[in-house]
């Protein structure tokens, strides 16, 4: 196992940094910060010397991977505003970005010729990417998010995948194009994927949608990529999904063979039933209402822990935060009824797949029972999260309609519908409480830590029970 450093350098510095001798290093101004201009020899030396120092003093590092146009403000063209820098304005975007990568690659390889340098194309605009790839140093690997730009249609809504999708099987057109350009000039290529969990849903260690993972892994294996990054800001846990990726890479066989092998290994006599469950989960999960906004703001990671608010909180859902009752942000590009409907479809398929999975667990070898029972809990938790997400979207949409109407009869009707949703949500919350108590990995993801603990679900149950006393007659 090796450690790779993620480098998003040189970070912009506070304006106060650029005094005295440093004034000449100032590049593009970014409000209270300013870019350290990589068109100056001093900044290039700083980048180079610091990496040389790290790689000479920390032995055994695997290498680095870079992002050179991220959300963070770094080089003068990281946000495509190079015209504001007196030096960079006359250079091309490709020249600046490729140079930052070259400086870092040279330094790493001077210290350790065997270390890998992965240049990630994240944030490279499609119109600039081919020229950047053409100018990269020969020693780097080009990494691209496999599923980026895949066209999808969910619930009749057409869109394109950005990143972080397990429900969409890559590779997509952007990665395919960039890898081809890199390969033409002899660079190695890497696919960035998510195979355990992702921003679509991250509250279990891995999602048993094995067919989707196998299909994607086999396609990548056939595409000629030289490496995989199996997770980024969300990671997960050692899982059968990762073993699927390993088999696809090492044995160059088809998805069915891989799935049969893994199913046999984990489930023994229950292999056929496990495969039926995985296929049912995977088929349903293709309906996930994917959208970047929904992934970050939606209620799916919190599931039953998300409270019932009788009146609008007016709080915004936040990334890696609490979804509150911000149903508009949750649903992003989807009308609420479509988002709820898609979550319901996914929940139903998980519910259906739990029957063969139970059978498979009961037939699994004793020495594998701890793992197979875990998988059942993760699938059950996923089903409850998706069902709860549908409920909470419905509930908040109904609540908002009830607030907006002055028609008493309509208010009564909406109230009855809300009560019906909450009766189901109460059942889900009680099941989820027991499940979360039984396995401390549920509700946890290593970069987000606990989305919730069992006591949060207890609070949800109280919020449901409290609801009718608060809302009835608008008290
Ligand atoms: Zn500059």
Image (cartoon, grey):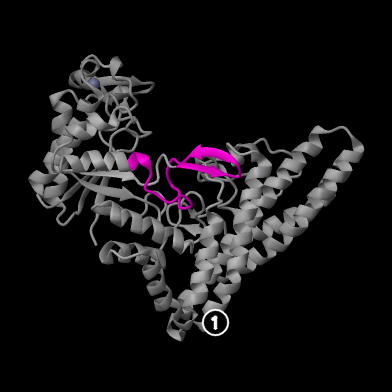
Q: In which quarter of the image is residue 311?
A: top right
Residue tagged by mark 1? 362
Q: Closer to the camera, 154 or 62?
A: 154
Numbered range of the magenta stretch: 151-175
* Quarter of the rendered structure image containing ligand 1: top left
Q: Is residue 249 visible?
A: yes
Label 1 beta carbon less than 8 Å to ligand 1: no
Using residue 386 as the reference point, say whether residue 198 is left or right of it.
left
Using residue 358 as the reference point, say whether residue 120 is left or right of it.
left
Q: Closer to the camera, 37 or 296?
A: 296
Q: Residues within 10 Å of mark 1 (few under 14, many from 20)?
A: some
Q: In which quarter of the image is residue 428?
A: bottom right
Q: Looking at the image, which residue is at 68% across and 61% down? A: 429
Q: Is residue 270 above or below residue 12?
A: below
What x and y, as percent, mark residue 293? 53, 39
Q: Quadrant of residue 7?
A: top left
Q: Is residue 97 above or below residue 309?
A: above
Q: Looking at the image, which residue is at 54% across and 56% down? A: 285
Q: Quadrant of the N terminus?
A: bottom left
What x and y, as percent, mark residue 150? 43, 42
Q: Does the magenta stretch include residue 173?
A: yes
């Amino acid at each position: 196992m090796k450690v790779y450093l993620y480098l998003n350098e040189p970070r912009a510095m506070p304006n106060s940094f650029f005094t005295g001798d440093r004034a000449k290093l100032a590049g593009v101004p970014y409000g209270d910060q300013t870019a350290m201009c990589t068109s100056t020899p001093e900044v290039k030396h700083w980048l180079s010397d610091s990496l040389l120092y790290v790689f000479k003093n920390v032995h055994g590092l695997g290498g680095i991977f870079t992002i050179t146009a991220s959300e963070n403000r770094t080089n003068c063209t990281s946000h495509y505003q190079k015209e504001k820098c007196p030096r960079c304005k006359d250079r091309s975007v490709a020249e600046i970005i490729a140079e930052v990568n070259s400086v870092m690659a040279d330094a790493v390889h001077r210290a350790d010729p065997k270390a890998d340098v992965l240049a990630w194309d994240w944030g490279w605009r499609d119109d600039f990417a081919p020229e950047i790839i053409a100018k990269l140093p020969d020693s780097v690997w080009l990494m691209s998010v496999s599923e980026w730009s895949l066209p999808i249609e969910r619930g009749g809504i057409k869109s394109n995948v950005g990143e972080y999708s397990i429900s969409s099987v890559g590779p997509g057109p952007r990665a395919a194009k960039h890898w081809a350009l890199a390969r033409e000039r002899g660079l190695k290529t890497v696919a960035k994927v998510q195979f355990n969990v992702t921003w679509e849903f991250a509250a279990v260690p891995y999602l048993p949608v094995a067919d989707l993972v196998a299909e994607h892994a086999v396609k990548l294996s056939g595409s000629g990529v030289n490496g995989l990054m199996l997770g980024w800001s969300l990671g997960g846990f050692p899982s059968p999904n990762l073993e699927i990726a390993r088999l696809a890479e090492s044995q160059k066989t088809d998805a069915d063979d891989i799935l049969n092998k893994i199913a046999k290994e984990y489930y023994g006599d229950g292999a056929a039933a496990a495969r039926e469950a995985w296929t049912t989960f995977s088929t349903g999960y293709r309906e996930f209402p994917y959208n970047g906004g929904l992934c970050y703001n939606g209620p799916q990671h919190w599931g039953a822990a998300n409270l019932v608010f009788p009146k609008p909180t007016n709080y915004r859902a936040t990334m890696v935060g609490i979804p509150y009752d911000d149903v508009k942000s949750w649903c992003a590009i989807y009308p609420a009824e479509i988002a709820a409907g898609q979550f319901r479809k996914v929940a139903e398929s998980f519910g259906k797949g739990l029957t063969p999975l139970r059978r498979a667990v009961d037939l699994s070898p004793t020495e594998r029972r701890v793992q197979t029972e875990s998988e059942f809990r993760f699938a059950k938790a996923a089903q409850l999260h998706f069902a709860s997400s549908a409920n909470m979207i419905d509930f908040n949409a109904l609540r908002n309609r009830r607030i907006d109407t002055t028609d008493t009869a309509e208010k009564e009707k909406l109230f009855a519908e809300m009560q019906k949703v909450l009766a189901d949500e109460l059942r889900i919350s009680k099941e989820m409480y027991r499940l979360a108590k039984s396995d401390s990995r549920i509700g946890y993801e290593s970069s987000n830590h606990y989305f919730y603990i069992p006591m949060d679900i207890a609070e949800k149950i109280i919020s449901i029970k409290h609801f009718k006393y608060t809302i009835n007659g608008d008290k």
